[in-house]
Amino acid sequence: MIGKRLSTIVFLIAVAVLASAQTTKSMNKDNKEKIPLYSYSEKELEKVSSYIERQYGEYEDVIHEIVSPDIHCDIVLVPPTDSSPYYKLVTMGAGA
């Protein structure tokens, strides 16, 4: 039951991220000005990843944003542990 709920939540978040990215892109479609793509460098990504692991726990799964018109934002899925028996979803990339 929890697995099905988690799958539904993750799916809805992924759809929301994708929909907002497509909406932003379509809104800027007629704008000829180029929108810069912001993302972490390798060093910054390592720092953010280690921070997430220290604060929330180790993770293996990341839901990657497919369409990214300006800021690339992923969702990190931190699995439950004995001390935290629930999944945690952490955004990564919005701070770039």
Image (spheres, rainbow, N blue to C red):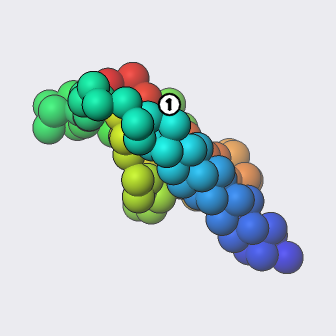
Quadrant (top left, top right, bottom left, bottom right) of the C terminus: top left
Quadrant (top left, top right, bottom left, bottom right) of the N terminus: bottom right
At x 39%, y 23%, the residue is 95
**Image position of 28 with respect to 96: above or below:** below
At x 29%, y 31%, the residue is 32
- Percent across and percent down for residue 22 are 51, 50
- Percent across and percent down for residue 23 are 56, 44
Looking at the picture, which amino acid does disc 1 mark? Gln
- Percent across and percent down for residue 86 are 72, 53
State left or right for residue 92 relative to residue 43.
Answer: right
Q: Residues within 10 Å of mark 1 (few under 14, many from 20)?
A: few
At x 40%, y 36%, the residue is 30
- Percent across and percent down for residue 76 are 49, 49
State left or right for residue 33 relative to residue 76.
Answer: left
As rendered, which of 18 and 79 lies closer to the eye?
18
**Image position of 47 with respect to 15: above or below:** above
Q: Residue furthest right?
A: 1
Q: Is residue 7 visible?
A: yes
Residue 10 lies in quadrant: bottom right
At x 59%, y 57%, the residue is 14
**Image position of 20 with respect to 67: above or below:** above
Q: Secondary structure at mark 1?
A: helix
Q: Residue furthest left?
A: 42
Q: Is residue 73 visible?
A: no
| Number of numbered markers | 1
As rendered, which of 22 and 73 lies closer to the eye?
22
**Residue wearing tag 1:** 55
